Image (tube, rainbow, N blue to C red):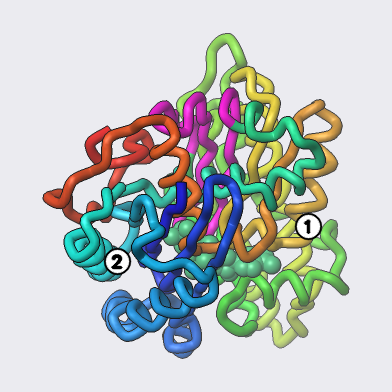
Amino acid sequence: PIVLGIESSCDETGIGIVAGRRLLTNTVSTSMDEHARFGGVIPEIASRAHLEAMIPALDAALDEAGVGMDEVDAIAVTSGPGLSGALMVGVSAAKALAVATGKPLYAVNHLVAHVGVGLLEDSASAAGDTESEASLLSGLGALLVSGGHTEILKVSDISGDVTLLGSTLDDAAGEAYDKVARVLGLSYPGGPAIDRAAASGDPRAFTFPRGLTAAKYMGTVQDPGSHRYDFSFSGLKTAVARVVEGLEAHDEPVPVADIAASFQEAVADVVTSKAMLACTENGIDTLLLGGGVAANSRLRQLVSKRCSEHGIRLVVPKLSLCTDNGAMVAALGARLVQSGVAPSGLDFTADPSLPVTTVSIGS
Ligand code: ATP
Ligand code: MG
Ligand code: FE
């Protein structure tokens, strides 16, 4: 089926069009620059930017794909989780389009869409084989690391059976990157800045905490602790701040590269080690890495090393498909159509805290 996907949960306005597993177009415009001077996404600015970008993005996507609305079989839209006002812009646009064209509308979960993007042919070839679709549809795990989320999912059936194995109790991984970058005087967004600074640093210069890895949180396989697969980054962020404050108090130079490398090592280590545990203990043999932090060079390196050590197949969609975009929404929508899931109708609303177990509204 040809499906048009609309994404507006955070600061990216994304329109993607797919034909089954084939990506036709992926148009993304971001308001990131407008948030830079605040050091984080300002919801009102994001909502207004979505309003301004939505119609031009829709036109551009249809144009680029060479597809007319009459050829589209279904529309899919992110209905949550995300920023309330931002989601509302996409949901309203999608409903208007559905009413105007009479096409079925699917309200889908943003986080599951991050996984659904792995079904596209582009991502499958990243996994290095052609059997990908079948294995991606059963027993798939996902490690989602972005500015808003840090989660490990077990996806038994992407059309409707998703379990949350673990998530962050405080900051998301990307949020930690952004906050630590600020402490180090690096630019926003912090992830790329820390990644660059870390390149010339020593990852062993400082030992920063790996959150929730103490025995009382981990427990054992037989008797798991309360947070075996969960994350916490606030202690790590504080530890970095303490080091910087200490050095500055003594007028000593701050070794930015070493701190960046050591911080990056701590994040990559804890995130990948917990993902490996979750996979091996839950019968997961394929892991999808998604979210903006999937761009991190050390994380990519470590996750691929550890996956091969554990015999886990790794799928890392190309970066433009890892960060927020409309193609992932369209890809999940196409899967729902193929699985015969009923469309969502028109009376759903955006849900900023939509649980990850709800793949689509009404399914
Ligand atoms: P969400 O997808 O959770 O709704 P989001 O829009 O903030 O929220 P993304 O756009 O997927 O998330 O990712 C943005 C985050 O990725 C930022 O926090 C940014 O610092 C981080 N990031 C980007 N590149 C890198 C990198 N090379 N290393 C580490 N982090 C990175
Ligand atoms: Mg973003
Ligand atoms: Fe996202």
Q: Residue furthest left?
A: 347
Q: Which residue is mark 2?
A: 90
State which tag comes first along the sequence, 2 or 1: 2
The front one of 331 and 196 is 331
Number of labelled discs? Answer: 2
Q: CA distance from mark 2 to mark 1?
A: 34 Å
Secondary element under disc 1, as helix, strand or loop, is helix
- Tell me the chief SS of the magenta region: strand
Q: Position of residue 126 (x, y in %)?
A: 76, 48
Amino acid residing under circle 2? Gly
The quadrant holding residue 38 is bottom left
Residue 154, compared with residue 6, is above or below; it is above
Residue 314, compared with residue 120, is above or below; it is above
2 and 1 marks in contact (CB < 8 Å): no
Left-right relation of 155 to 105: right
Q: Position of residue 238 (x, y in %)?
A: 55, 62
Visible residue check, residue 62: yes
Amino acid residing under circle 1? Arg
Of badges 2 and 1, the one in the foreground is 2
Q: Which residues are magenta?
A: 137-166
Residue 298 - label: 1
Which residue corresponds to the image point at 39% horizontal and 39% vertical from the top-left? 337
